[in-house]
Amino acid sequence: MNISVIGGTGYVGLTVAVCLANKGHLVFCVGRNEEKVSKINRGVPIIYEENLEKLLKDALEKKKLVATTNMKDAVKKSDVSFICVGTQSMEDGRIDLRQVESVSVGMGQALREKESYHVVTVKSTVVPGTTEDFVIPILEKFSGKKAGVDFGVCMNPEFLREGRAIGDFLFPKDTGIVIGELDERSGSFLSEIFKEFDGEIFRTSLRCAEMIKYARNSYLAKDVSFANEIANICQKMGVDYLGVKKGMEMDVRIGKGRFLDAGVGFGGSCFPKDVRALVTKSAQVGVDPQMLEVTLKVNEEQPFVAVKLIKQVWGNLKGKKIAVLGTAFKPGTDDMREAPAIKVVNGLLAEGAEVWVYDPKALANAREIFGDTVFYGEKAEEALSEAEGCIIVTEWPEFAEANLYRAMKGKVIVDGRRVLDPAELPPGFRYHAVGFPRVVET
Ligand code: UGA
């Protein structure tokens, strides 16, 4: 098939475009920014995502992917288009639909000039009802055609985890594929793309597909906040949360692979935004979403647990040199959207600390966010060399190497993600961790 991916220069869009090209489709990767588009055409993936660069280069070599700023042309040349633009949170928690709106207008205009059948697929995360009540009316207005008759419409939520997005897309065995369809023809047409994927396909209504995405992310975010709350209680009650987690996972009704890693909270472009959007939407329809509210409240506070732990060591942090290891919201990505590291760094700065940050992939983004309020280490050792204490915020594998901390000037470590085994640390260290009631002195 010929496929256009609108928003193809973003995290989701580029992954989707490259993966579909890898499956043999001809993909038009549509973005607004000329510079990004030209980089993609030269094989430069613009974001960090494992294997993305290789797959992009393969697709370009096989002439299966073309990046372009011309959406109209791309839509006219393709059979299916995926809308993958961002739906960021607004001040009041609602999602910002401006990009979805402008893409729908452009897509409607393209459909007006198109003879053959085309399926518009919303992949952006949008609250239930958006595709039917917002996208379709715009498409119909600007195309002068009727959805479900002249063109098809689907909603296909994405279940990609940053850092593993390529694998999640190509092998959706663990997540399945959800296709919300306006009518049978739309759904069958879109299903063709996914029929050889190893993953169950669930066809349902547009609204149900939209809600599935919110329900899944809210469920997982709730688990993270639950884990953090239990870990905070454990810390005060002399219990190591890691043992509790292991014991919980032994119960098959809970099981392994749940989102039960406690730490400094969840971040990223999805969980915080999606839970907030569902809270706002629920309130609009007259439901008081208490569990969702608490999920956010626990998460709001959680990064400061690590700051409090390190503050306890000296009583106050004025003038203390503290290294923050990891600024990406999780390992495997350079993404810092709503990263817990932002709150940790700001919390340390508010206490008067001098902060050094290091991240293997996200330093450029960190510079944009923190500017000259902090110092940057090009290597972990550089950030640590002046540090009296450090907080591990992102569980990059390199931070689990105990010898790394020999580079520190001081000897205080707060492990915000339980990556280190304190028994492996050289002598003279004080090790604290979230959900860990003791202080290990090595
Ligand atoms: C999440 C979902 O896992 C994907 O299924 C979904 O497609 C995606 O959002 C999306 O909506 O686009 P992602 O945000 O990339 O994926 O990352 P996760 O691995 O889910 O982690 C989210 C946050 O929760 C991270 O900050 C992570 O550190 C934190 N987390 C996760 C924990 O603190 N503890 C855990 O046990 C798991």
Image (spheres, grey):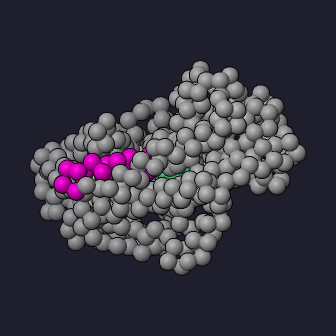
The chief SS type of the magenta part is: helix
Q: Residue at x 75, y 39 (%)?
A: 412
Q: Position of residue 360 (x, y in %)?
A: 67, 40
Please say whether residue 277 is one of the residues in the magenta stretch: yes
Q: Position of residue 257 (x, y in %)?
A: 56, 68
Quick check: 261 above or below 410? below
Residue extent of the magenta highlight: 268-287
Between 277 and 291, the one lying in front of the other is: 291
Q: Is residue 136 visible?
A: no
Please say whether residue 379 is one of the residues in the magenta stretch: no
Total labels drawn: 0
Q: Residue at x 20, y 46 (%)?
A: 108
Q: Position of residue 226 (x, y in %)?
A: 48, 59
Residue at the outermost bottom position: 252
Left or right: 381 in relation to 417:
right
Left or right: 210 in relation to 412:
left
Q: Which quarter of the picture shows residue 16?
A: bottom left
Quick check: 214 above or below 393? below
Q: Quadrant of the N terminus?
A: bottom left
Quick check: 303 above or below 383? below
Q: Position of residue 227 (x, y in %)?
A: 53, 59
Residue at the outermost front position: 237
Left or right: 192 in relation to 227:
left
Residue at the outermost right position: 427
Q: Residue at x 70, y 26 (%)?
A: 320
Q: Is residue 101 visible?
A: yes
Q: Residue at x 46, y 37 (%)?
A: 37
Between 307 and 377, the one lying in front of the other is: 307
Between 198 and 386, the one lying in front of the other is: 386
